[in-house]
Amino acid sequence: MKAAIRDENPVLFFEHKALYATTEVREELTGQEILGKARIVREGSDITLVSCMKGVADCLEAARLLSEIGISAEVLDLRSLRPMDNEMIQSSFSKTKSLLVVEEGPITGGWAGEVISIANEVNNDGMKLWRIATEDRPIPFSPALENEFYPSATTIFESVRERHAR
């Protein structure tokens, strides 16, 4: 948020309502954060999980579950969608050879497709690229239905386990 305030350009800053109740501090802020710089939240070697906001927490939980079955997941927090850290995305994907993007927005026209495109610019022979996003339909209002609608740590875990079994 401080980087958004300091930026000379107009900036849209979004917060995820599900993160309001969290009490843990996810990173030490230096005050020198720059828009457009992603952050590796967890190192891994088998797959890169890319997301932002609440999706990062879900990816971290999925990475924990994946480690229990021997899959090492790197978790990348984009922190900024525009500008996007193309170099970090490509570097992590080149290392792990497998990339899953997790977005809570609709699968059609979302930013996850842009991340896939950025990663695909790397020579991807034999590499795996895919995304998880919401269906192209209205978001339910009921918390119970909402929980089933959005990607979760479980859907991320199951998707990676299924793809890596092939």
Image (tube, rainbow, N blue to C red):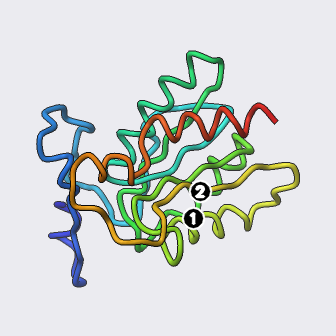
Q: Which residue carries the number 1 mark? A: 115
Left or right of residue 125, residue 5 in this image: left
Q: Position of residue 36 (x, y in %)?
A: 40, 65
Q: Up-down: is 110 above or below 77?
A: below
For the C terminus, give its image quadrant.
Answer: top right
- Residue 120 x %, y %: 72, 64
User: Which image quarter: residue 52?
Assistant: bottom left
Q: Answer above or below: position of 118 versus 93.
A: below
Q: Is residue 8 above or below residue 145?
A: below
Instruction: Name the disc covering residue 131, or none.
Output: 2
Please give the name of the residue rendered at 35% of the width and 57% of the height, measured from the top-left corner. 79
Which image quadrant for residue 8?
Answer: bottom left
- In the image, is 35 to the left or to the right of 63? left
| Residue 85 placement (x, y as % from top left) | 50, 63
Q: Nearer the viewer, residue 153 or 25?
A: 153
Asked whether the residues under the numbered discs 2 and 1 touch, taking CB atoms below 8 Å apart as contact, a structural biologist would say: yes
When asked about the image quadrant of residue 58, the answer is top left
Determine crowd level at label 2: few under 14, some 14-19, many 20+ residues with C-alpha closer than 10 A: some
Select label 2 or label 1 by which is in front: 2
Residue shown at 13%/47% (left/top)? 20
Q: Could you tell me residue 80's position as x and y percent?
A: 37, 64
Element at badge 2? strand
